[in-house]
Amino acid sequence: MGMPVSGVPTETPRSPAAQVPAGHALARIGRAIRSNHKATTGTILLVIFILIALFPGVIAHASPTQDAYPPRLGPSSAHLLGTNAYGQDLFAQVIWGTRNVLIIAFVVGLATTGIAVLIGIAAAYLGGLWDGSLSVLTDVLLVIPLFPLLIVIAAYAHGASTVVLIAAITVTSWSYTARQLRVQALTLRNRDFLAAARVRGERSLYVIVMEVIPTMTSLIVASFLTNALYAVLLASSLQFIGLGDPNVISWGTMLYWAENNEALQTGQYLWAVAPGVCIAALGTAFALLNYAFDEIGNPALRPVRRSKRVRSA
Amino acid sequence: MRYALRRLGFFVLTLWVALTLNFLLPRLMPGNPALAMMSKFHGELGPHELNALETLFGVNAHQSLLSQYFGYLHDVFTGNFGISLSEYPASVTSVIGSAIWWTVGLVGITTVLAFLLGTGLGIVSAWRRGGKVDSIVPPVFVITSAIPYFWVAMVLVLIFGITLHWFPSQGGYYVTTDTPGLNLTFFQDVVNHAFLPAMALLITTIGTWILTMRNTMITTLAEDYVRMARAKGLPGWRIMLDYAARNAILPNLVGFAMSLGFVVSGAILVEYVFNYPGVGYMLLQAVSGEDFPLMQALFLLITVAVLLAILAADILTALLDPRTRAAR
């Protein structure tokens, strides 16, 4: 939906300093998460959401679907967020809704990043006709407006189940990452360690998987985080406008029902506010982590201490 | 010149892909969705319209797929998008004509504002790195980039529309008390109604401008020519604007048009929340009313608008950046 956090697609490759062997990179990522405040906050938020998604029943005792309670209750100890117009417990819905959103975020994040890695790096490494055709495919998909396309697909599918939602978002939204990875991989093409691998007579697949991909770990992780964030936003938006499965318990469908029942106009604010805050919090977790990885991968963006800087004017 | 031609070629190619997608999607979907639509409107349509729909969506078609395809392309290029089912018997083209200006006005003004404000804040943020603006803007952006467009819109409706009653939060003007026309009251009415939707779009899109500008300018500030300018003793604002910002603005200019695609998706959701009578709201109305001819035409319209903007950005880049002209 929106633009990736790092801004418009640029052809500027990340600094070569970011390219380190895989083992080191993973260790560095671990260290970086502990030392970078943004990364720490993001990780803690994300872990909380994952725990909620894994064990919703432990936290919310009420059923999210049962409309057994009096409608439009305010917050109380029995119903932390009150109930909605159908007499469903809003707290239980928010808690149980976490699972659907997280599944979409992780599956789409992994799938889009996987496709992008394959296509982007293959294009850069194989070059020639491969590069030409894969790049055109990537660029075409990049400029066709994604959200209207998803709306059209979901409309023809008569409301998208979670599986259709995941498939549609994945197929349409890998191109930005593929392009970024291609540019990054192009800067590697003439490096000595790849020349060495070629001289050793390694096959292309081996070189791509064992030599090229490990050097780009931090960019790939950052891409996964961006893609997961946009999966959350896109899926919630589609569910909100009623193009998801309205019977699924998720934050997006909660907002759909809230809008349909004019929750804001009738004073049931929590119905619309609570799921929105959750989406924003989960999104922030991904965005914070992504931002932190940007700083790890591109040292120029790290915050500077004022005293160390040569001040101008 | 060669660069411009290449971009033009790419534009034509993308346009063709979008047209073909539009043609293939209903045919690829399991259980042709057009069938359901047609059975829904069966009683209201004459045999002639039904026949036209059948050709449009490839139901009961006796033609081959290829001749259907060429028929479709012919229709599109002659501006024949069929009959709108929800506004029957108005043609799709006439229905869209009424909505388009609302969106152009709203999205156009908001995008220009977001670009100017965002670029300005980005410049200040990079120039006074670690200063007030720089310590507030990026963290705030992290959060705004993670909030769905429609939810920002809903919160604005709640605060300024329902609680404070400062601005109207539904529609494009007071349909019951105001008649469209070229007079001051109507103009004020339109501006009043556009304020909250515009704010929603501005809040969600401005961050990208700020951050792109800031990050590019941090790079240019480290260049030798900036150090040179400092050594010459030029005033700070000249270094900031003429040396650093001028060379950093290119990605933002390119992004200006690229972002239209994202602004469009934002606009669809914002228009939906505010019942704003633009193209996005109409698209969602067409979807919920299963008015597939209208939906197809709107999708094409939005796509063409975005592609044209990108083409314009490409040409602008070629004009502004000598490096692209030199490259082959």
Image (cartoon, coloured by chain):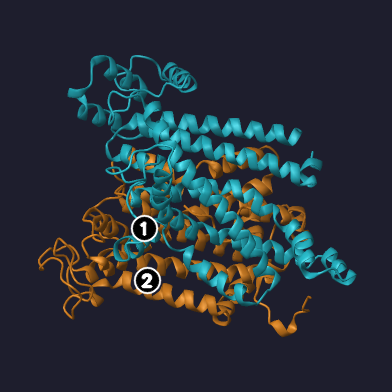
Q: Identify which residue is drawn at 65% across, 32% down.
A: B8
Q: Identify which residue is drawn at 49% across, 49% down.
A: B263
Q: Chain of mark 2?
A: A
| Closer to the eye: label 2 or 1 | 1
Vertical comparison of B322 with B227: above or below: above
Residue that badge 1 annotates: B167
* Inter-mark Cα distance, 2 to 1: 40 Å
Amino acid carrying mark 1 in the image? Phe
Q: Which chain is orange?
A: A
Tell me the quarter of the image containing the C terminus of chain B. top right
Q: Identify which residue is drawn at 60% across, 49% down.
A: B256
Query: Along the line of sight, which residue is nearer the eye, B80 or A18?
Result: B80
Q: Quadrant of residue A99?
A: bottom left
Q: Is residue A239 left or right of residue B93?
A: left
Q: Is residue A288 left or right of residue A212?
A: left
Judge the density around disc 2: few (<14), some (14-19), many (≥20) Cα neighbours within 10 Å: some
Residue that badge 2 annotates: A50
Residue B151 position within the rendered picture, expressed as x and y whole percent measured from the top left? 37, 60
Is label 1 in a helix, a strand or a loop? loop
Badge number at residue B68: none
**Looking at the image, which residue sits at the far bottom?**
A307
Vertical comparison of A182 with B104: above or below: below
Residue B75 position within the rendered picture, expressed as x and y whole percent measured from the top left? 44, 19
Judge the density around disc 1: few (<14), some (14-19), many (≥20) Cα neighbours within 10 Å: some
Tell if the residue under mark 2 belongs to the same chain as the one under mark 1.
no
Q: Is residue B194 left or right of residue B207?
A: left
Q: Chain of mark 1?
A: B
Residue A26 position within the rendered picture, expressed as x and y whole percent measured from the top left? 58, 72
